[in-house]
Every structure is written in C-alpha cells, then in structure tokens.
Image (cartoon, rainbow, N blue to C red):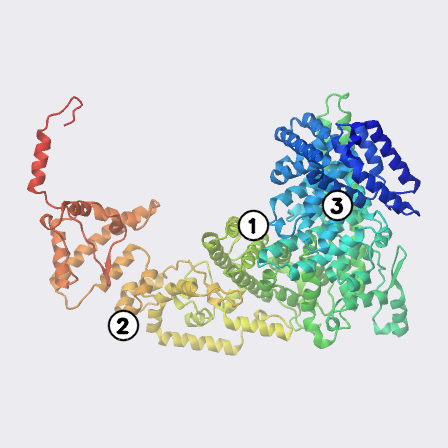
Amino acid sequence: GVWIYKDVRVFTRACRALRAHLESYGCSNTKGPTAQGAKEAAQEVESALEACILPALTLVAANPAAVNEVWSVLSLLHYTARFRLYGALKVSLQASNPVLVAQRVRTTVETKKIMRRLSKENVKEFGRKLGKLAHADPLSVFDAILSQIEVYSNMTNPVVDAFKYLTLMGYDVLTYCVVVFTGGRGQLAKLKQDGINVSLWLSSLASFCGHLTRKYPGVELTALVQLLVHQLKDSQSVDLLVLKEVIGRMTGVEVMPDLSDDQLAAMAGGPSLRSEAFSASAFQTAGSAKSLAKGAIRLKEALLVGDDPLLAPLLVLISQQRTSIVFNTDTPHLKLIGVLYDNCQEALVQYTEFLKRTIPDPEEYIRVMPSLRALSQDYKLEPEVVFLIYRPVLKCIVTTPVPRAPADGETAQAEARKALAINCGGVKHSWDELINICRNMLPEHIWQYITPELYLTFWTLSLSDLHVPVERYEAEIRRQRSSAMALDKNQGNMDASSKARKERDRILALADKLEKELESQKEHVVKVKARLKKEKDAWLEPVAQDRRPDTALHILQICILPRVTFTYSDAVYCAKFVHELHKMDTPHFSTLQYYDRVMKDLSQLVSSCTEYEAARMGRFIAENLELLEKWRSDKEIYDKECRSRAGFAITFGEPNSKRATYDEFLRVSSRWHNKITKSLSTCLESDEYMHIRNALIVLAKIVKVYPRVVKHAVHLEKRVVKVRDNDEREDLQTVAKSYHAQLMSQKANWVSEEKYTPNMEKEERAPKTAAAEKDANPAGGARASGDRAGTSHGSHGGGGKDSVREEENGAARGGVVGAVKPHSRAEHNHDHHNASAHHVNNSNHNKEATSNSASVKDKDKEEPRSSGRRQKASDLNTPPGLTLRQPEADKAGRDKGGDSNVSTPKESAGKRSAKEEDGSAAKEKDSVKGSGRGSARREQDERDPARDDKDSKSVKETKVKREAITMEKETSHRDKGGDDKKDVHREERTKPKPKDEMEKIKDVDKRRDFGDVKRRREDEEPRDAVKSRMEPKEEKLDRPKEDGKRRRIEYEESPPATISDRRTEEKQRDKPRDKRGKR
C-alpha cells in the first residue's frame, strides 16, 4: 500500500515491473491500448498506480530518480488516463488517509513561504526549492501557486521562470491543474460582479498559460485544446481568451484591435513586410524568431495528433460560436454580447491566420480542412466565414472565366462550365459545381441582382491582390540599409565585431528580400487586374434591365458589409475593390448610387456594430471619403478619373447618357457630408450606450477627412461636448474627450461652406432673397441675413425637407441624387414670389427677426432625443452658438430713422402688446446677453405713462448713470477673464451709496406701491437678531431679488449705536493693561 515509500528499492522495482507489463502489450500515450488484452493490462496498471504508487510518491523525500521511474510508467498511458489518476490522488490527499492529509498541509505551507519571498532577482534560488517540493507532491504545490497567480498577476513571469527545475511529470501535473482551474467553473463565475467584464483571475490564468506553453515543451497542449473544444460545445466562449494567449505567445500571431497607418499599409504586402511591420508587437518581442517557429510547429502537431485531430473541430466550433453568442447569450447587457462577439471574432481570425502560416501548401491545407460544401451546408456556417477558411484553396482557382457571351454558343458555354476550376490536393471542382455551391449559400432571389461569378471573385481576392504598398516597401528598405550603414560606422574592434557583422549581413539580406518581394507583388497585382478586366463584362450582363438599379444596393448588402467588419485589411480591401470596379468601367455598375447608399444608411450601419466592428467600419468610411476628396480637389482629376466612366452617368440604365459634371459632383458630395452629419448626430443624441460609443469611434477614425465644413464641425462639437460633460458613463466621457481633442486638432483644415462648394453658392444662393432663404432655412430670417452679411457659416438649401425628399426620389429613379438637378423655372418664379411677399410684410419680419435667433436654442433643448427620428434640417443649416453680426446697412438706416430688417431690443419691446410681453418674458431672459442689454430691457419694462414725469425723469437719469458705470466695470472685468455678473454686483453692493440717491429710490418705491421696505429697530428685536442681520448676505450679493418685471435691491444698513453699547465701550477703554498690552 502507501507504506511502500519506506523502501525506495522496492518502490523502484514495482514501477519497472508495471512499465514492462504495459510495453508487452504495445501501449502508447498517443493511441492508447490497441492490442488484444492491452486494455485489461492498462486497467490493472492504473489500479496499481492509483492505490499504491502515486500516494506513496507523495511521502517519499525529494528523489528525482523515483519520480522519473513513475513517469516512465505514466508516459505509456493516454493523457486522459493520467489525468484521471491525478484526480483520484487529489481526492486521497484531501480526505482519505490522515498521513496524506498531513503531508499535503505541510507542502502547502512550505509553498506559500517560498512564494512570499520569490521575485525576479532570486528566481534561481527559490526556483530550486519549489522544484524540490514539487518532486514528491506536485499537486499540492501547483494548487497553492495557481491560487496565488489568480490574485497577483505580476507573479506570472517569476513563477514561470522558476518552473525550469521541474521534472517531466511535474509539467504533466501542472497541465492537469491548469485544466482544472480553468474549466472547473461556470460562465458566470468567469465574469465580474457587473456581469459585463471578464474576471481578473481568468485573465491572469490565460496569460500564465501563454507564457507556460511558449517556454516549456513538456506541457500537454492536446489536453488544453481538448478543454477549449468542450467549453465551446457548452457555449462558454469566455475561455477563448486562453486560446488567444496560447496562439499569440507560441506563434507570434496577433490580431491587434487597432492598427497604425504604416501597419495597415504593410498588410497589403508580402510576408516579409508584414513581419517587419509587426516585429515590435508584444507577442513578437516575447521570443526570438526560432522559438516562435518551434512553438508554431509544436502547436500544429498538438492539433493534428491522434486519429481524431482537433484542428478542424476547433475551427468549426469557433465559427459557430459567433452566431451562438448573438442569439443564445442569456444576459440583459448588450455590451457583454458585443465584448464576447469581438473576442470570438478575434480568436477566429487569429486561428485562421495561424493555420495559413503553418500550413502554407494549399494541397496540405485542403487535406486537413472540410470541403467547401460541408462548411456551408453541413456545418451551417455563414458565407463570409466559409470564404475566410477556404480562401487559401480558392487562390488556386483557374483564371479562365466561364464564357457568357451569346456569340460563343451554347456548346462552348457548356464545355467551359464543365472545365476544372480547382484541382488541388486531390480535390477537384468544376466551374458548374463551384457556382452551384455559391448559389446555395444565399436565397435564390439574390441572384436576380448579382451573378455568382462576381460574388465568387469578390470573396476569393484579398488586399494584396489589388494593391501594392510601394511607399511602405521603399521606406522599409531605406530603414534597413541605413541600419546596416550605422553598424559599419560603429564597428571599431574587428575582433569583437563578429556579432555585429552577422547582424549587418542579416539586415542586408532582409533588404534584398524585400526588394524581390516588391517586384513579385507588382507582377502578381498586374496579373490579377488583367484577369478582372477579362471577366468584368460578364459580371452584371445577365441581370435584367429592371433589376439593375438595385445592383449597387445588393453588392453592398451581400459583399461589402459582411466583409468590412472582419479585419482592417478587409475594410480597406472593400474600398479598393469598389474603386477597381469604377476604374475598369464595369458595365451596369453605378458608382454614384453605391456611394449614395453608403452615406445614406450610415446611421443604421453604425448602430448595429460592436465596438471593434465600428472601428473597422470607420476605417472603411475614411477610405471612401479620402477617395471622394481626391476627386473633388481638382477638376482635372475628376474629368480624368470620373467624367469618362459609366458609373457617373446621371440616368442609370443608359450607357451613353450624360455624365455628372464637376459642379454637380461638388453638390452631391456636399450633401453626402450633410447625411453623415445627420446620421452621426442621431447616434450621439440617442440614449443607447452602443449608439453613442460607436458614433464616437467612427468619428475618431474619419477625423482626418471629416468634417471639412465649419458648420458640420460646430454641430458635432456641440453633441460631443454634451456627452463629455453630461453623460454619467465614464467610459463614454473618456472616448468623447479623446475625440474632442482630435477634432480640435483638425480645426485649421475647416473651411466655410462657400469655399467648400463655391459653385453651389453662385447658382443656388445668389437668386434667393431673404424670404426665400427663410423658407429654405426655418431657423429664421435674422440668421439668414447674418449669413449674407459675411459670417463664415453659410447655409444652403441642401438640408431642407424638400431636398431630402428630392434625394430619395432621385435614388428611387436610379439616377443621380436630387442634388445634381438644377433649379427649374417654377422654383425660380417661386423665389421671386417669396421676395415680393417679403417686402410687403416687412414689419412682421422685423418683429420675428430678433426672436428667431433666441428660439433656435430653445428648439434644440426641447427637441426629444430619438435614435429613429430624422434630424431637422434647420438644426444643420445654421449651427447654434454662432453670434450674428449686425449688417452695416441696417445700422445706418436705423440711425437715419428709416426701416431696418433687424430691430433693437427697445423697438421690439415697444411694438409688442402687453399680452405678448407677459407671454414672452421667460424667452427674453434667455435671449438677452450681458447686463447692459438686460438693464435696457428692464428700463423699458419699468416705464409707466401715468407716472409722475419729474420723479420718473430723475430716477431714469440716476439709473442710467449707475448702469453706465456697471457696464464699464463688466467690460473691464470680462477682459481680465472674470465672471460677468457675480463680482460686478458684489462690488456694486459693497460700495456705499450717496444719501440723496438712497432717498430718491425710497420715495419712488413708496409711490409705486411695490411694498414697503421692512426694517426693524433695535428696541423691536433682540440683539442676536440684529447681529445676524448685520452679517453680510452672500446670496443677496450674488443673486439680486426680482419682483415682477423689475429688480429691486434691498440695501442693508447698520443699526445706530445705542446707549448701552457706548457704556460698554467706555468700560472696556478704562480697563488697565497687563504686561502683554492686553486689557
């Protein structure tokens, strides 16, 4: 039994006998017992190990030889049998034998003592002590260590370095402990208490697994992968964090949540350029190139070991988990679903990239993967996932397209369809079979708008097939050669510079490799584009004439949008592919319609994304806007690249119809910017967390190309500042602050709308009068007149309701949106009719002018925030917060006594009736700025014709003087950067008033019967009340009292001194002084 530990020789001979018994039946740790009688022999050996050998080993003093003898037996068993024995031993150590329980307690205490003293500096010393403890009782040691790592994540590196003194059995037991700690808890236990974020213990354990598997080959990777497979079957996608860490640490393959411009450009290059671009990542710097290559081979072997390799099942389960997270996750938190979906998406992309690197041969790749039909029909995977997995095989597709021209004849078409499209690794697919597989992926009615050939071509290619990053290649080559030159200059001692010479040779070899790779990439892109030009005529030709107007929408729906959100390189590829369709002049493809649909549906696209998907969507929008800005920047570029293409035809369906002119394209692109502003403003005004965050992420990605117009920038800034200052969610405040800083950094690139679309101002704005602009812009005539007077934020008719309706009608007709259609004669006559009506009703216009500017902000405040409601056009055409300057002509006309389009506050108040004045009192308080204009308004309100002329005149003169002094103080104080009202009123109150002025104010107050000023004498109230009344009142100084329409200030006077006060003061004066001079 257990007491066999007392005689080590007997213990060793027993282990050797068990090993010989297993070897006689040909047992193996990979296939298990296969020979006749081997299964019974393995069960007998397992019983002996469980009852005698393993419990006795925990009581043996540290003896590596005895441990190796036990491992020689265990290594012949499958890892499932070994882990079952470790589980039985764990139960025995906890409650079976008192001797074993005591040994477990002693080992745990010693382990904790060592862990308290372990650090990066003393790894060698205390690592040996840990190894010595783990020789006999590894289960107790590793349980204590993993419990510490779950709490203290900074202990990962020292502990992993200390494990280099373990035996092979120690690594095997450590793998078992990691599996138990990771898979022994449910989904909810792996989340924090908020139910949204992943627990810290799981993050620490995942990082520990990554470091452990990278450094020590003795870890059983197959068991760890099998655990992940079972967890995914149980819909526990949180454990994919462990897979990401293992793949990243062992192979250096990393999916970064954000990429720089240089890294994104390198994604279009070859393997050498990509490796250099990501050489500074965390996983790449964790190990050398050789160690990463060895780790990739080890992981590949672990996935392919045994009769049932786990490589393909793990890939299919990860792919199916994307859909399961969306529909089967039981949580009220939408943010958690987004986080889990993003993690699953990253794990899928990372795993497929690892397979492409470790299995570069398409024939070997196709042997370990399920077929294309099985992925789409048997496993029910989404089309975008199927093509992501099968794209390395589709690269071998035959470049000869299926002929569809009627001139070829039916016989030639039938023979072409039967020709082989794929012949790789024993897998053969004809064009007919390949097209039928694609047809079965989507509903049948989809193929009325797009052909399977175009669909297959889009999903087969990647970014490196369409674009060569020449600038990025040249920059990297220059950097490598400059590094080699620097090594030559710093090379001093020839004896000690052998390492430097090797590094120099490596750098020069890499530079030569990059040059060859650049040339091969150029040749490859030329071949791909030549193939596309041959196939383009047959892509949309079979589509019926009445279906062609919706072709751009279906390309966007089934091709662009599913692929945009996968990776950053896919987002750029989608933009490049559409640009290539335009450059090749693909028949029946409308470029204008495509971009119009992208900009029009932006609100829905952003709202339905997760956080990482929104970032990729923002990159896609940035690529499109950058191309559109290039076209609108120069008329020659537009005429060369757009005017001659069929995609810019005004009337869709007629190849020879008129093309959109440069001026019309400027108007269309300006309206697209308006659509982007409306869509993102709708998301920012929503109450949904995901809508606001996604809008901010998209705006941050397109900040270099949008906004370009001051009007749009001010409009967005208002919404972003509101989120930054008023939203209670701290993560949204952080993102809003970050974007606001980026937005302000681009302020120098903003221009007025007149400069951004100069021709639109000449054709559309010049004929319009004030009334016509008022109809087009409901914000009011005063704002429109201020725009004509020279403000930098002009407004045009592109944001009104009629224009929006016109755009929708234009898109439905299949032609260019309504912006490119010039004004008709009826609209021109309507403008002149509005102009004449404006001159007739000039007096009414004067009354409304002053109230319009004040009412715009009230409308914005009263307007409910709704994500599904269309934004008001007036809110866009004239951004709030702008100060309108008074035109000089109106000012001169008012000085001469003539009519003016802008009324002063006094004139407008004098013309109002008493009823209107009472109803608009609250609005006038918001619209009046500054104490000077407020005093004039109060003076106007206080006029009473029945008042005594003499008294009213004297009071008026006194108030005018006092207000003039106050205005001067306010102006000087504002220039110094202080508060406008608080300090001025405080200074005015603390200043003593003249006696005659006080008497006049008191007499006037009594005559007007506004209430007597109640004052108490000293004999009518106690001294404590007098004392409290004499103290300064901060509220009255900061906020003067208001009664009705006029403000009345109560001046506090100090009470007169009484007889008792004087006697007390005399007694205090007569007291003798002490040595310190005190009485």
| Frontmost residue, 435 versus 324 | 324
- Which residue position is annotated with label 1? 193
Q: Quadrant of the N terminus?
A: top right
Q: CA distance from mark 3 to mark 2?
A: 82 Å
Residue 80 percent across, percent down from the top left? 79, 46
Q: Amino acid at mark 2?
A: Lys
Task: Give left or right: position of 328 versus 711.
Answer: right
Q: Position of residue 1010 (x, y in %)?
A: 17, 62
| Nearer-N-terminus badge (2/1) | 1
Task: Report the mark closest to the observer, 3 or 2.
Answer: 3
Marks 3 and 1 in Cβ contact (< 8 Å): no
- The tag on residue 1023 is none
Seen from the viewer's position, the closer of residues 1004 and 329 is 329
Residue drawn 54% across and 76% down? 824
Give the secondary structure at mark 1.
Answer: loop
Q: Amino acid at mark 3?
A: Leu
Q: Give the labeled residue for mark 2.
A: 915
